[in-house]
Amino acid sequence: MARSATSARGGPRERDETDATRGAESPDDQPGPPALAVEGLTKRFGDGDDAVVAVDDVSLRVERGSVVGLLGPNGAGKTTLIKCALGIVIPDAGSVRVFGTDVRDGRRAAYADVDAMLEGARNDYWRLTVRENLRYFATIGGVDPDSVAARHDRLLDRLDLADKADTPVRDLSRGMKQKVSLASVLAGGAELVFLDEPTLGLDVESARTLRAELRRLAAEEGLTIVVSSHDMTTIEAVCDRVVMLSNGRIVADDTVEALLGAAASDAVRVASPDLDAETVDGLRERFEIVGVDREATPPAVTVAAGGDRLYELTDALRAAGVTVSDIRTVQPDLEDVFLERTGTVPDAAGAGLGGESS
């Protein structure tokens, strides 16, 4: 957890349960400045010809109650951008405002309701129990833990940690530790939260539960979330907006629906019991084969054959004696969008905030 952000909060202050869930209204009911406003942010590392521009004149706004995803390969600038937003790294140019407060003018006030979980860091105290961690992090965040005890109970229940509440974190699985890290970040009722790879180490069902909980927190409590993940399913399922970064610059910034709607798709999936290896090899001589699923019933092949090439594909299938069971256009996903915009694909190794060099 990026406790440098949390420690910017003031001294202990009373926050009752109503205050901890005061964001339950929709974002439209919450007047005022955005949760995060970055203008002309630039950060260089090194000098002269060897200087690396990690963030290059980036501007973005994160509205209250929204969930914004950061997507980009290793070195895209995600880490530096987040660390500048958290005050961990000082930019060379530009400004950062958190809930309307310029971080240069009032750091303590700006980060009073901000917390973060950064991948690659020890996010909890493993000798403490799960509940003790929540109480501890609420306390260092300036919140009386007794005033948000009901919130902690809800978090434990929704993240399937209730039966582990009195278990030392060191005795939990990796996936459970990841859930504890998230619960600790949310323990004090921060309004703006940065999450790096929140589903890392979780099984399919736990990841699905976590995604649903993040959406609920944003919708019901007005929590503002900035999430970085290489997991396209998480980004598509959780985020209202996606900011794609490449070489320190924003290459796309729009809703998930708009980005997917604007993406071109020339992939066609053909299913047929006649798709043996020889037939697929024959298609490969004339078309780009995107993928082959021999385990499907019936077997299927995905071919790059958009536009007029679709007619060529159907003719080729007919000539090969293939009886088509199903044929359909493959809808693009965020990986396709990113590839279209940058020519590269975000990779699992470099997509997280904590594992990136820039």
Image: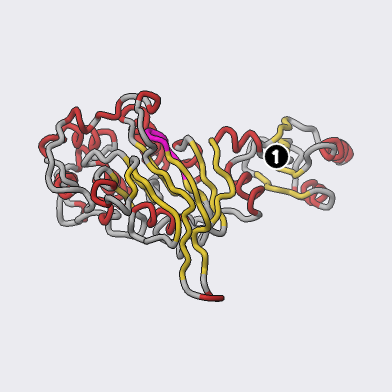
Left or right of residue 237, residue 306 in this image: right
Q: Residue at x 67, y 37 (%)?
A: 330
Instruction: State the extent of the magenta-drawn residues as a range.
Output: 63-69
Depicted 197 relative to depicted 20: above or below: below
At which x and y percent is residue 113? Answer: 26, 42
Mark 1 crowdedness (10 Å alpha carbons): few <14, some 14-19, many ≥20: few
Left or right of residue 310, residue 232 in this image: left
Left or right of residue 143, residue 344 in this image: right
Q: Secondary structure at mark 1?
A: loop
Residue designated by label 1: 264
Left or right of residue 282, residue 148 in this image: left
Q: Quadrant of residue 203?
A: top left
Q: As rendered, which of 179 and 19 lies closer to the eye?
A: 19
Q: As rendered, which of 94 and 340 lies closer to the eye?
A: 94
Q: Can residue 346 be seen at all in this image of the molecule?
A: yes
**Quadrant location of the N terminus?**
bottom left
Q: Residue at x 52, y 55 (%)?
A: 57
